Amino acid sequence: MPASQLLADPSHLLAALNELVEWSETLDFAYAWVHSAGDTMEAWCALDDAKIRRAVVGVHFGGTEPFALEYFNDAIPGRVRVIEDRGGTFHPKVIVGRCGSKRRAIIGSSNFTPGGFGANTELNVRAARPIEERVGEAVAAPKNASHQQPAQAAASVDARNAQRELG
């Protein structure tokens, strides 16, 4: 595998995600928005719950699907932090895989959503060179953000979406 690779096509992004999940012993990720498309999105289905060490998910602007938050709350309790950003917008898009002392990552503009992995025009990079431990630590402790449990955040997102629909 090359040290880094541009991923401009959704099929290449999905293939890179599948390879990363397969290669990794553990996964850390941070995404501004996560959406499973009702548990059917290919990228969502590629995740291996047993490998997710920690995840940080944003709920700003209601872009994260409540089902995804509820799923994380049940499937990987205690390993997901939900961010409701109060000092700007929580905006990361990164997944880091670890295998022994090696790390690989996919970093770019794609949220973990059907648009980010399909319909949108996105640009991501698969990086395979040594990645510093600080990348994982940044995933674990974002600045300027308050934290919620996934179930609380799902209810908040549902309420905000209902308010938006009512006008």
Image (tube, helix red, strand yellow):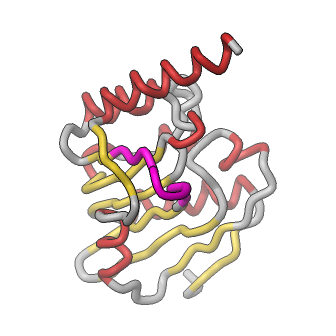
Range of the magenta residues?
A: 82-91
- Point out residue 75 in the picture as x, y percentages from the top left corner: 26, 33
Is 85 covered by the magenta stretch?
Answer: yes
Task: Give the residue displayed 20% in from the left and 38% down from the top.
Answer: 77
Q: Is residue 102 left or right of residue 122?
A: left
Task: Give the residue displayed 66% in from the left and 39% down from the top.
Answer: 114
Residue situated furthest left in the rendering: 78
Q: Is residue 97 above or below residue 56?
A: below
Q: Nearer the viewer, residue 137 or 116?
A: 137
Is 78 covered by the magenta stretch?
Answer: no
Report which quarter residue 113 is drawn in.
Answer: top right
Task: Give the residue displayed 46% in from the left and 46% down from the top.
Answer: 58
Task: Give the residue displayed 65% in from the left and 20% down from the top.
Answer: 164
Q: Main secondary structure of the magenta part?
A: loop
- Point out residue 67 in the picture as x, y percentages from the top left corner: 44, 24
- Point out residue 129 in the picture as x, y percentages from the top left corner: 47, 88
Report which quarter residue 8 is drawn in.
Answer: bottom right
Q: Is residue 30 above or below residue 81?
A: below
Q: Is residue 52 above or below residue 167?
A: below
Q: Is residue 35 above or below residue 79?
A: above
Quarter that holds the N terminus: bottom right
Q: Is residue 159 left or right of residue 111?
A: left
Quarter that holds the C terminus: top right
Q: Nearer the viewer, residue 21 or 110?
A: 110
